[in-house]
Image: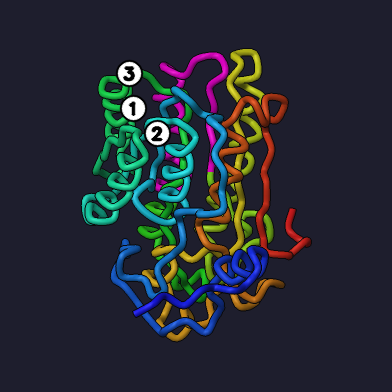
């Protein structure tokens, strides 16, 4: 059977393939931590319209939460820009991590998978040491792993959840940075993942939004501290992004409308957030930028 010729113009074809999924999504819920492979629709992370330019050639990056979501998309774009990557993830996320590693290695770069819990300081030290031992060095640290659980009121928010959220979302950032600084050279980079919740607050994410606000000020403070050492520190603060973090936290019916309140009427896809990390990681692009929190909000201009 003969193939039907696509008579659309290149511009029209590009627009058609660039459309991003909008709510309503299928109602769905996952047990924590959630797997990207089980999300419907699958998050977009390959960024087919992104053109690499060798901006990270020869670099080594360590990415926490690198198995899925934003971390996966960052790992893939870093690899396309020439970097080897190490991805930190929970043992339960091994299948997602394997998919990420397969994509990175298919791009001709090395990918080291490091399962464990970043809330444990000794683990943070060990993954940095393993990254350097197996990949030869460390140039870029991306603090991205996060824990999130909605609670309707402060009275319903258990102390145990607050402690866990702070351990994963901010204390781990301190520990990873502390361990990385032993190895980061002049020209090295630390990147943190913040959130719109850290800029505007969130009434049902009291602990999570508090940690994200802390990440923003940690970024600015550490940036000032490290200027004399020639190490830059920046932060990307997205609005809603279609990742496993959300269906593992919200009721299924809420997931169906996730991101609908943004001006663009949809959540971001991970591939739309990852280029900001490339920009901050590249000394060719952002050598004079440190201590910044870049919000990516789908048209919302009130945060920050």
Colouring convention used in this rendered image of the protein = rainbow
Count the marks: 3
Q: Is residue 124 magenta?
A: no
- Asked where in the image residue 124 lies, by quadrant, the reply is top left
Q: Is residue 293 left or right of residue 257?
A: right
- Mark 1 and mark 2 in contact (Cβ < 8 Å)? yes
At mark 1, the secondary structure is helix
Query: Which region shows up in magenta?
Result: 166-192
Relative image position of residue 215 (x, y in whole percent): 56, 43
Looking at the image, is mark 2 or mark 1 earlier in the sequence? 2
Name the residue rendered at 41%, 39% in the picture: 63
* Disc 3 target residue: 136
Name the residue rendered at 34%, 35% in the picture: 108
Q: Is residue 33 left or right of residue 15?
A: left
* Disc 1 target residue: 128
* Disc 2 target residue: 62
Between marks 2 and 1, how big is the CA–CA gap?
8 Å
């Amino acid at each position: 059977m003969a193939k039907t010729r696509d008579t659309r113009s290149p511009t029209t074809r590009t627009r058609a393939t660039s459309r991003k999924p909008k709510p309503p999504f299928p109602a769905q819920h996952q047990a924590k931590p959630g797997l990207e492979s089980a999300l419907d629709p699958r998050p977009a992370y390959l960024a087919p319209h992104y053109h690499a330019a060798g901006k990270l050639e020869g670099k080594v990056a360590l990415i926490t939460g690198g198995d899925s979501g934003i971390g996966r998309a960052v790992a893939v774009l870093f690899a396309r820009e020439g970097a080897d990557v190490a991805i930190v993830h929970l043992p339960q996320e091994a299948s997602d991590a394997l998919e990420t590693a397969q994509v990175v290695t298919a791009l001709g770069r090395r990918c080291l998978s490091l399962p464990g819990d970043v809330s444990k300081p000794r683990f943070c030290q060990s993954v940095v040491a393993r990254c350097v031992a197996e990949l030869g060095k460390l140039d870029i640290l991306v603090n991205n792993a996060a824990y999130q659980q909605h609670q309707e009121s402060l009275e319903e928010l258990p102390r145990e959840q607050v402690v866990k959220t702070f351990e994963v979302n901010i204390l781990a950032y301190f520990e990873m940075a502390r361990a990385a600084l032993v190895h980061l050279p002049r020209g090295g980079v630390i990147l943190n993942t913040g959130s719109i919740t850290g800029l505007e607050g969130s009434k049902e994410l009291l602990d999570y939004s508090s940690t994200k606000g802390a990440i923003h000020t940690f970024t600015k403070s550490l940036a000032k501290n490290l200027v004399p050492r020639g190490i830059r520190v920046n932060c990307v603060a997205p609005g809603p992004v279609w990742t496993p973090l959300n269906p593992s936290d919200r009721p299924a019916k809420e997931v169906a409308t996730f991101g609908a309140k943004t001006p663009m009427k949809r959540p971001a896809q991970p591939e739309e957030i990852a280029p900001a990390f490339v920009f901050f990681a590249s000394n060719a692009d952002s050598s004079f930028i440190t201590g910044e929190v870049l919000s990516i909000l789908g048209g919302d201009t009130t945060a920050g």
